[in-house]
Amino acid sequence: AYPEPGPDGPAPWLRANMVSTLDGAAQHDGRSQPISCAADMRIFGTLRALADVVVVGAETVRQEGYRPARARAE
């Protein structure tokens, strides 16, 4: 994942990121947190801080206990 700002101009663009195990699993016992490490969390935090919108699946929100995003200072 590269945290550099996106391209300049009016065209919208998308950045996506996810974590998975070597065998391709995206969760363990229904949650993704157990397969993440501190470095993964730093990357997610950086990308979220750069984002205008963060899209998370509904079941992920329920299982992981997501909280509302904090607005960044302008």
Image: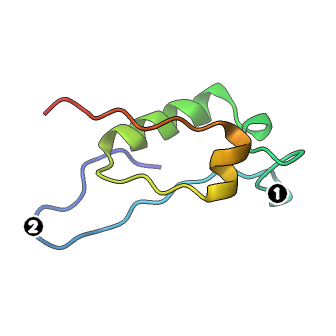
Which residue reaches farthest left?
9
Query: In the depicted view, which residue is nearer to us: 68 or 31?
Result: 68
Q: How is the image coloured?
A: rainbow
| Label 2 CA crowd tier, 10 Å (few <14, some 14–19, many 20+) | few
How far across and how far down the image is residue 17, in percent? 53, 54
Left or right of 7 in this view: 28: right
From the image, which quarter does the C terminus lie in?
A: top left
Answer left or right for 74 relative to 53. left
Could you say where residue 48 lies in the image, as x and y percent from the top left? 41, 42
Q: Residue furthest bottom?
A: 11
User: Residue 26, how many percent across, how many down?
Assistant: 76, 55
The disc labelled 1 sits on which kind of residue?
Ala
Quadrant of res 34: top right
Q: Residue at x 60, y 36 (%)?
A: 40
Q: CA distance from mark 1 to mark 2?
A: 37 Å
Whether residue 67 sits left or right of residue 3 in the image: it is right
- Residue nearest the viewer, comparing 43 with 12: 12
Sequence-wise, which precedes: disc 1 or disc 2? 2
Mark 1: secondary structure: loop
Which label sits on residue 9?
2
Q: Secondary structure beneath disc 2?
A: loop
- Residue at image position (36%, 65%) is 14
Residue pointed to by mark 1? 25
Q: Residue at the location (55% across, 55% down)?
A: 56
- The amino acid marked with disc number 2 is Gly
Q: Is 50 placed left or right of 26 in the picture?
A: left
- Give 73 or 42, whichever is nearer the viewer: 73
Image point (78%, 44%), residue name = 31
